[in-house]
Image: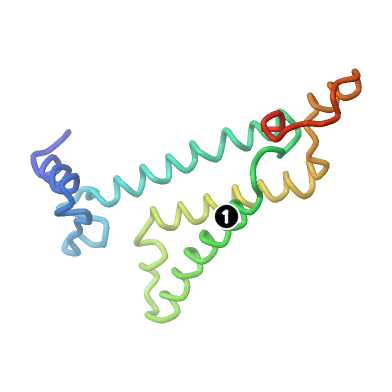
Amino acid sequence: GVTVAFVAQLIAAAAGALPWVSDTRAGGTYFWDGAYCLAAYCSLAKVIITAVKYVPQAVHNCRRKSTIGWSICNVALDFTGGTFSFGQNFIQVANDGNWNHLFGNPGKLALSVLSIVFDILFFVQHFVLFRDRRDPALLQQRSEGGSTVVSLVDQA
């Protein structure tokens, strides 16, 4: 259930006074008195929100068999960030010899792996599967004698 301590953490975090609560006495960065602290819940929420962001786009691309209407540059930037975040964990492990840097922050690890996996999927969709990138509805409109001038709004 919800404890008084958790409600106090939530209120303090909302006020900006206590955004990251951790106590290493419980055996790790993300544990506080035997339960996940607020930082872990926020991290989990970010991973869920990221999955909710990526899955519909991947499904939408597959249904349309097109990646028209969105920029691959943003995917490349996201892939770079995920790769650097994942790589930072290994640099810290190599520096300290402590694997807790990799597994001690499950939110960071999950977010970077999730980003990398979906970005690779989007690269494959954009450059391999749907490299033609033409919207089938627009092609049908053109073949039926529709206008050959198509605005960016029509492609989105």
* Above or below: residue 44 compared with residue 81: above
Residue drawn 12% across the image and 38% down it? 3
Residue that mark 1 sits on: 116
Instruction: Provide residue 51's location: percent of width, then percent of height.
Output: 49, 40
Q: Quadrant of the C terminus?
A: top right
For this view, does 50 lie left or right of residue 98? right
Say how the picture is coloured: rainbow
Q: Residue furthest top?
A: 144
Of residue 95 and residue 143, the one placed in the foreground of this image is: 143
Residue 123 in the image: state x and y as whole percent: 69, 50
Q: Residue at x 39, y 45 (%)?
A: 46
Q: Amino acid at mark 1?
A: Ile
Quarter the N terminus occupies: top left
Q: Secondary structure at mark 1?
A: helix
- Name the image quarter holding residue 143: top right
Who's the residue at 70% across and 35% down the image? 152
The one of 133 and 52 positioned closer to us in this rendering? 133
How far across and down, in percent of the image, does residue 115 sit?
53, 51
Q: Position of residue 102 (x, y in %)?
A: 42, 65
